[in-house]
Amino acid sequence: MTLEHNHPIHSKEEQIKGLLEQVSAYIEHYHGGSVEFISLDGDILSVRVGGACLGCSRLSETLQGWVAGTIRQFFPEIQVVSVE
């Protein structure tokens, strides 16, 4: 995944929302789940999972691997937490 650099500078929150949309589209397409942006408070990114992710035994792996891993490629300081 790449961030678009040919547009005006976007806020960190806007960039993170864009990354999450890409990750969520992948998860939805291949696994039937979703990840939704809830809030960015300092370096804490709150997300809500949905679809097939709910109750999945691999949810923690998905959140820390795909979601947090992707975000940290661009924003290493960000911690991802899941909210209900």
Image: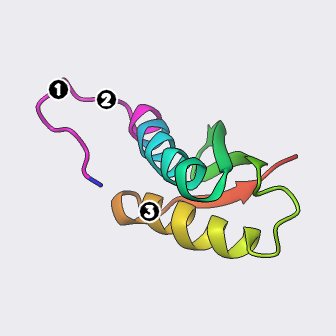
Q: Residues within 10 Å of mark 3 (few under 14, many from 20)?
A: some
Amino acid type of the residue that numbered disc 3 sits on in the rendered structure: Thr
Residue 7 badge: 1
Could you give the CA–CA distance between mark 2 and mark 1, rounded to whole angstroms? 8 Å
The residue range painted magenta reads 2-15
- Which residue appears at 50% of the width and 44% of the height? 25
Q: Which residue is mark 3?
A: 70
Amino acid type of the residue that numbered disc 2 sits on in the rendered structure: His
In the shown orientation, is residue 81 left or right of residue 7? Answer: right
Query: Mark 2 or mark 1: which is in front?
Result: 1
Amino acid type of the residue that numbered disc 1 sits on in the rendered structure: His
Viewer-closest of 31 and 12: 31
When the figure is inspected, residue 76 is found, relative to residue 57, above or below; the finding is above
- Which residue appears at 88% of the width and 46% of the height? 84
Magenta segment, prevailing SS (helix, strand or loop): loop
Could you give the CA–CA distance between mark 2 and mark 3, rounded to whole angstroms? 18 Å
Could you give the CA–CA distance between mark 1 and mark 3, rounded to whole angstroms? 21 Å
Instruction: Residue 65: give x, y in percent of width and height.
Output: 56, 73
Q: Which residue is mark 2?
A: 10
Mark 2 and mark 1 in contact? Answer it, CB < 8 Å.
Answer: yes
Q: Residue furthest top?
A: 8
